[in-house]
Image: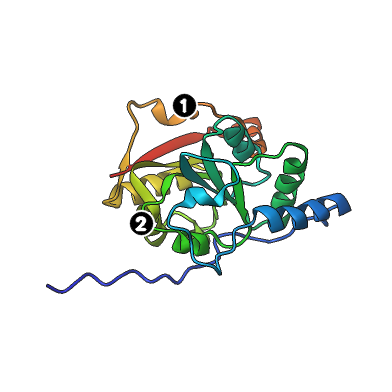
Amino acid sequence: MEQEPRRSRTTEAFFGRRRGKPVRPHQALALENGLARLGIDIKTPAPEDLRTLFAAPVSKVRLEIGFGGGEHLRHIAANNADDGFIGIEPFVNGMAKMTTALVDKPLANIRLYDEDATQLLDWLPEASLAGIDLLYPDPWRKKRHWKRRFVSPVNLDRFARVLKSGAKFRFASDIDTYVNWTLQHCRAHPAFEWQAADAADWHTPYEGWTRTRYEAKAIRENRTPAYLTFARV
């Protein structure tokens, strides 16, 4: 029987600018040392067991794509010491904030990656992740830029490949068009099932949630956050 052709792995640039204001000297030092110690090198083969990436023993591994300044990632890692977390952030200033914060409060269950998330997703072993968080991603508001939104059939294929059965993909945004976009794409993908229990469920923050600066800004500007959860079937 003829097999369905595999979707192309060619991607757009899903993130915008790489740099903002110049980082301060102490941040630059923390960034260099932090990535040297915690950065993941995808030029080497991925370990069969991702738990071996971490300095501390962990029971499972989760991924956060585009962690911004790292508020949520540090909070969830500090409160779930038995889990390992890989954080991806290509924006230099965000990664500098994260590595600087980890100087003061180190967390042995965090590893970092500062390039395109699709590269790391393609490097990861199949069924190796217990969860993926995509929180307040760039919404690419203009219609001509929608193809740059991270949620897409190709990237959902990537998620489906690396997530274990029953693992959760969590998506939060305050942009209605991107929330609807994500719902449509995930409900159309055979590997994902929306986990909303009732009509109000998707406006209820996740358990253990900490408000990020992006969410605080959205609320100040009268935009309502949405929290979507999809299970890998």
Question: Of the numbered discs in the image, which one, if any, rests on residue 204?
Answer: 1
**Cα distance in 3D space between marks 2 and 1:** 28 Å
Q: Are marks 2 and 1 in contact (CB under 8 Å)?
A: no
Which element carries disc 1, helix, strand or loop? loop
- What x and y, as percent, mark residue 3? 19, 71
Mark 1 is surrounded, within 10 Å at the Cα level, by few (under 14), some (14 to 19) or many (20 or more) other residues, namely few
- What x and y, as percent, mark residue 130? 42, 43
Which residue type carries mark 2?
A: Arg
Which residue type carries mark 1?
A: Thr
Q: Residue at x 53, y 59 (%)?
A: 117
Residue for badge 2: 161
- Residue 110, picture quadrant: top right
Which residue sits furthest right?
25
Q: Locate the N terminus by quadrant.
A: bottom left
In front of the other: 31 or 185: 31
- What x and y, as percent, mark residue 10? 45, 72
Q: Residue at x 49, y 26 (%)?
A: 207
Q: Is 60 left or right of 32, judged from the image as shown?
A: left
Q: Is 31 left or right of 61, judged from the image as shown?
A: right
**Looking at the image, is 56 positioned above or below residue 154?**
above
